[in-house]
Amino acid sequence: MEIFIQLVLNGLLLGGTLAIISIGLTLIFGIVRVVNFAHGEFLMIGLYAVYLMNSTFGIHPYIAIIPATLLLFAAGAVMQRFIIQPLLSAEGHIQIFATVGVSIALMNGALLLFGADVKTVQGITLGTSSVALGPFRASSGQLITFAVSLLMVAGLHWFLQSTFLGRAVRATAQHRNAAQLMGVDVKKIYIFAFGLGCACLGVASGLIAPQYPVFPTVGTFFVLTAFVIVVLGGLGSLSGALLGSMVIGIVDSLAGYYIAPDLKEVVYFVIFLAILVFRPTGLFGAGRGSE
Amino acid sequence: MIKKHWASSFCAVLTLSVSMASLADVKVGALYPFSGALALLGDESFRGLEIAVAERNAAGGLKGEKIELLKADAVDAGQAVGAARKLTSVQNVTAVFGSYSSALSFAATQVTEMAGVPFFELGAVSDEITERDLKFVMRSNPTAKNFAEGTITAITKIVAPSLKLDPKQLKVAIIHEDALYGTTIAGFQKKLAQEQGLNVVEVLPYSAKAVDLSSLILRLKGAQADVVLQTSYQNDTTLFFRQIREAGFKPKALIGAGGGYSMQDTLKVVGAQNMEGVLDVDFPQFQTNEAGAPGISDFAKAYKQRYGTEPRSGHSLINYVGAKIFLDAMDNASSLEADALREAVARVDIPSGQTAAGIGAKFAANGQNERAHTSVMQWQNGVLKTIYPESAAVTQARFTDHP
């Protein structure tokens, strides 16, 4: 029983890490309706930014979250303005290919700039230390990530529901043309939303930097799982992404122990396929016909 | 004006003919992953070859001709085929050197074999590469089987005697990344452990792209493994070390089979104190006794002079030694035709302990170097030091409470 509880705890904490990465992806999809294949590479940019701030100025990654978030907001906004916006009225697959292209360019750019070496933040204890909770153990970094991911979902939910800008964002997500007729500057909203989705990765990079080293292909380690989570939770749904992350985290942990570590991906991809077959809109999806 | 024009075109013709003359050099291909996920060690491997070629050129080249090294980037098997085709049919190279990765080697050797161009493998470890009856594929480096032998030797000859235990009393767990590299080595480990009567309690494969190994570590903890054999790349190695610390799992010995365990960068990420006492089996590395590896310090010096940094791993060394063996054989061949090169390689006879990596060279009919072996090393105070074989050892194994 003790092992089972430790496994569930590990799974939930892993879920927190996955959630913080998936939130931005689901936001961008839900609002801009673009499947951003460069999501993992934006995470990589964030991680490098955090690493550089740590190695040059000795800043703790948790403090580096602020500049990293601003940087990624800008990067996302630029991507939307100059790459996605010109393709807005093109077919969906063209936008997808554009994001794939950005992904490859960024990955190889990082390889050119930083080389393939793995780098990590140094000289910190908060975030890397291990905490004993009775007979169970957890990493302080994962606990903090978990807490922040819950706060972030709550915060974004409040923002989208209760502020004027949030309402404009939701209106744009629901129907682009109708929102435009109501006087919403759709293009600006898209730029803002894409930036916001990427900014979430700025927070994620600061939080996961104490636990994971950075290297040019680090994004590919997370992004596939993030896609599974977003589809599982329902594209565009924040609470879906959170729940999906927890489900995948726990499945990952339990399957890794009770089945086999190399088969855990198989288990959650089977769940993924089942969701696609039986509930294609995901757990919290808006349903068919939501544009 | 016209005269001037004439003069400049004369100059152009002159430069053209000079560059034509340099085209008559002996061209050899260097097929490595220079970009993509394997780029770091691919490039490190290439540096060994580059230094060997530079040395040979400084010593007069091959049969009086300068060697021109043509780089070919192979990120994956598909690109390796393309790169090998370009080298053999467009650039008409005399031989191809490569390749660091077994997957790339499998693909590229199919092409070079068909083209009748010798492929000199300096770093890929899959045993299968030289077990396919290919005529022009020759390999200087130790194979996966040699790696597995090294890890089992580390248990029976180093860990067990240090702990004053019978090797059979130790509970051994084998964990490995689930692609070709890990699966091949772990397969040999399982077989050899059985032959030696060792007690293997767990064999657990996992994906090298895993972002969480906590459940695997709980299984190891549950099985009370004394010795963990891991075959892994860099990220999964760092992840494993971080998570065993978090889980409070302390095996008596951790033994890696190269890959992530050999890299300075892994140490930087994991922290020297967390890797203290960890054993690693790999190609011979730089902290090796010169007596068992003549020329090793000269190579390290040449490396530092050329690239301005310390070598990042022993990949450059084994590639350098292999390239030297093959380049010497090429120079001694009756001609640079493929058959003559193969024959010259078959004549090579270097006793063990006579190269900068400590390996010898004697090639079997299938092209595999039978005198290639791995070294057992230990991380001590942040440095990877050779502890076995004894002739190459710089220090003795030390076991404290780790990691």
Image: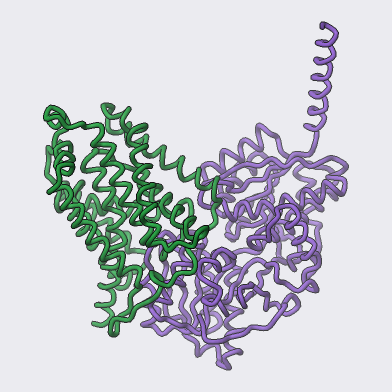
Estimate the x, y position of residue B324 in percent, counting from the top left: 77, 55
Estimate the x, y position of residue A185 in percent, counting from the top left: 21, 31
In the picture shown, does residue B48 fall above or below B252? above
A81 or A219: nearer the viewer: A81
- Horizontal relation, residue B286 to residue A273: left or right: right
Q: Quadrant of the C terminus of chain A?
A: top left
Check the rendered structure and report the hue given to chain A.
Answer: green
Q: Quadrant of the N terminus of chain A?
A: bottom left
Say if residue A142 shows up in the picture: yes
Kindly indicate the quadrant of the structure image that contains residue A252.
Answer: bottom left
In the picture shown, does residue A239 fall above or below A141? above
- Horizontal relation, residue A165 to residue B27: left or right: left
Say if residue B368 shows up in the picture: no
B388 or B107: nearer the viewer: B388
Determine the residue positioned at 32% across, 63% down. Answer: A264
In the picture shown, does residue B316 fall above or below A261? above
B195 or B140: nearer the viewer: B140
Estimate the x, y position of residue B120 in percent, counting from the top left: 69, 51
- Horizontal relation, residue B333 to residue A122: left or right: right
Kindly indicate the quadrant of the structure image that contains residue B20.
Answer: top right
Check the rendered structure and report the hue given to chain B.
Answer: purple
